[in-house]
Image (tube, helix red, strand yellow):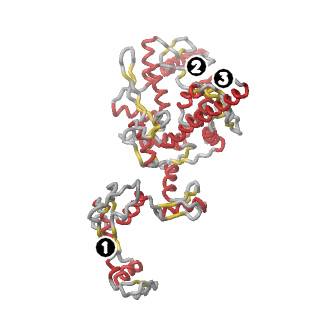
Amino acid sequence: MFTTPLQTPAWSIASSAPPFPPLLIVDPRKNRNKDTSPTEKPCKCGDCGKGFKYPSLLEIHRRSHTGEKPFTCSVCGKGFTQSTTLLRHQRFHTGERPFPCCVCGKGFTQSSELLIHWRVHTGEKPFTCSVCGRGFTQLSQLLTHQRVHTRERPFTCSVCEKRFTNSSNLLTHQRVHTGERPFVCSMCEKGFTTSSNLLTHQRIHTRERPFTCSVCERGFSQRAHLLTHQQVHKYIHRMEEGHSSGSATRANTENNNPQPDLRTASLVAKPASHGLVPSAISNSEAEGFKSLFRLEIHQRSHTGEKPFVCSVCGKGFTKTTYLMLHQRIHTEERPFSCTHCGKRFNSTSSLATHQRIHTGVKPFTCSVCGERFTRSSGLWTHQRIHTEEKPFSCTSCGKSFGQSSTLTAHQRTHTGERPFTCSVCGKKFSQSFDLVRHQRLHTGERPFTCSVCGKGFTRLFTLQSHHRTHTQENPFSCSTCGKSFKQSSNLLTHRRTHSGERPFTCSLCGKAFTRSSSLLRHQQIHNRLQGLDSAFNHSQD
């Protein structure tokens, strides 16, 4: 039987706690058999010997031994030993929350949850840590907190063996290995491992900055950013006080004019820290960063300082995180694994980019032809096809390229270097991806399959070109005549009809061609003629 006060007395949370909780739970069994001793439990369980006051309680208990669950949910089929437990469970399906808080209106499915929530308003924390005296509203929170003192971490990751104090932290951590990001932004489809990270990210779209600095009124999307930002003001204040006290001492010593008001000074002398060169930092410059730490890192872009050096190759970095990522190149550590194909990566960002191959997500779109890419770098490289920008030039022949990697591979045509060798047939290649494609001739692997006709290909580029035969798409257009092509190489060849360029020249007769295939066909004419000449001379002999 539940009783609720008919009238809520007027009281203020700020001034004092309410004289009673909003819901009183009365156990009718307390009024039964008042003469019965509180320690007397005449009904004994024949299996475990546990005693109970009433036969009905013994009957419910015996179901823990027999496994009987006579009360079944009609929605999901889950069974329960008590009707009251079934009633509470059904509220998950109906959404019923019959126990509302009279202060904030929040509803709960159980009265026990309401009583725990009530402590938020009353400030009651009945569970106290015996070590540090910190109080908690729930016993489970106290047990988790005590692991801080005991250093107990009972939940272990099966992949990297990292340990955690509670199961929820372990569950969140495991998403680092699985790549799972269950919380997806509805605006940009970016995924996150926790709901709190998603909530913070969404403020980028809404431009909400709920945390405001009381000094400069700058807003922040996270409370942590506000706290670190406020350290900048504290630092400036300490430096100004230091200047003020120093000026006052000098003024009193020299019996000079009164000290000036340094609060209006625009520059603050910054002492050297973390190896930085001493410099002057203005208030506006300092307030442009969320913390002094970020300001110091930024200054390294001006000073060129790279204090974190790799012990293997000597390469320097401005941040320790960059050094840690770099060191995985030497250790070959790849702690992040793809759940689809098992491929491993040295950073979460590389894993997230890779997974777009499986999901098909291509968030970067070319504004000219509409082609989509999984990486921003791929889009930048592609856009040079339209702009015809080729910023990387060969020092040997002057030929220009849109990518530095293409230039490096091209330079091997001059040096003759072929550093990649096939372990099966010993054939050498100048580029690693040429070796990977070649090895598919031995394995018969065709990992790129057309979703329309099922045809397999050894190269992704070939699949993409093939797919355009189904869609009839011609994304590459000539800026001179408007003719469209399925492949960029065909467009490049076509442009030579307008420019008159013929880069492929026959070494025997000097005739030039727009395509290498045309040159090869032409050279076959010389080969046939040479064969005829040889046969004629032989017949004359």
Quadrant for residue 450, please give it: top left
Circle 3 SS class? loop
Frontmost residue, 539 versus 483: 483
Q: Position of residue 112 (x, y in %)?
A: 38, 66
Q: Which mark is residue 96?
A: none
Q: What residue would you read off at disc 3?
A: 257
N-terminal-most mark, 3 or 1: 1
- The residue carrying pointer 1 sits among few (fewer than 14), some (14 to 19) or many (20 or more) residues within 10 Å by Cα, namely some
Q: What residue would you read off at disc 2?
A: 393
Frontmost residue, 347 versus 233: 233
From the image, state whether disc 1 or disc 2 is nearer to you: 1
Which quadrant is home to the C terminus? top right
Q: What residue would you read off at disc 1?
A: 83
Which quadrant is home to the N terminus? bottom left
Which residue is found at the position 33% from the left and 83% from the top? 32
From the image, state whether disc 3 or disc 1 is nearer to you: 3
Placement of 408 over or under 445, stated as above or below:
above
N-terminal-most mark, 2 or 3: 3
Residue 156 visible from this viewpoint: yes
Circle 2 SS class? strand
| CA–CA distance in space, label 1 to label 2 | 80 Å
